[in-house]
Amino acid sequence: MIGELEFMYEYGEKNTWKVAGASVRGSDHDISGEPCQDAYAVRTLPSEILVAAVADGAGSARLSETGARIASDQAVSAVDSRMLGGGLPNTPEAWKELVSFTFDAARSALEDESRKLGVPIGDLATTLIVLIATPQSIAVGQVGDGAVVFGNESAEFSACSRPQKGEYLNETIFLTSENAMDSLQSFFLSGCVRQVAAFTDGLERLSLRMSDVAPHAPFFRALFGMMDATKDVTEAELELKRLLRSPRVMERTSDDLTLLLATLPEP
């Protein structure tokens, strides 16, 4: 149980997560000339702590790419600042509170930006996924679609969250929505974590069995095999961009795409 684990959070310790991420513009935006409205942020902290956020700006929102960037950056910064002051949570309830704090901070940053720009907060509409992973645990918060998948020491993959869909096709919930915090999903698991993947909704049909949101294991084995085979992060990120722009992917979606991968070597 998590209460039986002891963690330390001290700067200066070596961190061994290997992380690679990529966001690419979807074919619809290639045609229209609009920017990629996805964003992600990553921070590796001492004591082998990985913090990451993935955001998907609403296609109908005028400044959604700004909203996605602010939400992902603020979420990662909020986790870092909270841990620096108090270390890792030691109960499931404390993990849930940390996730809620993180989403409150990201929502507040969007509210501040909307006031600064003099625009409705809906112009910054974005989804948000936040994950905090250690070798012994993973916590995830999510508002909107997309998903997080993790693998254990046996390369068995599990989904940490379920994509949130709205009443209509291709509709989801955004962090800027009035009921956003009521819709927040929180997930926590105490157990071995060796691989983590986070992605926006454009990859859901390739990576998940939508009937029960079970990960397609061959898809993730290939991804993490690529991570193991590449020499450094730059090479891995180039490979991710090639994958996201490949015919296999582009034929199945016209949406912007973001994929973040992290691996932790065996101790």
Image (cartoon, rainbow, N blue to C red):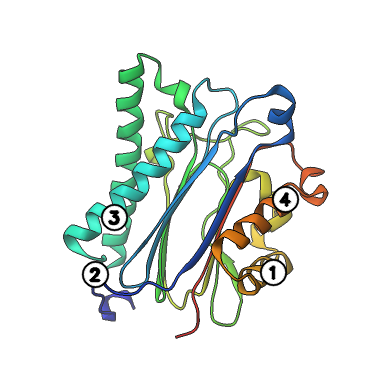
* Residue of label 2: 9
Task: Determine whether, in the image, residue 174 is placed left or right of residue 82.
Answer: right
* Residue of label 4: 205
The three-letter amino acid code for the residue at tag 1 is: Ala
**What residue is at 55 percent from the left and 54 percent from the top?**
21
Q: Residues within 10 Å of mark 2 (few under 14, many from 20)?
A: some
Q: Between tags 3 and 1, which lies in front?
A: 3
* Farthest-out residue, left: 85
Q: How crowded is mark 3: few (under 14 residues within 10 Å), some or many (20 or more)?
A: some
The three-letter amino acid code for the residue at tag 2 is: Tyr
The label shown at residue 80 is 3
Q: Between tags 4 and 2, which lies in front?
A: 2
Q: Which of marks 4 and 3 is nearer the N terminus?
A: 3
Disc 4 + disc 2, Cβ < 8 Å: no
The residue lying toward the viewer, choosing from 27 and 56, is 27
Q: Between tags 1 and 2, which lies in front?
A: 2
How much space separates mark 4 and mark 2, taking CA atoms?
Answer: 38 Å
Task: Determine whether, in the image, residue 15 is placed left or right of residue 195.
Answer: left
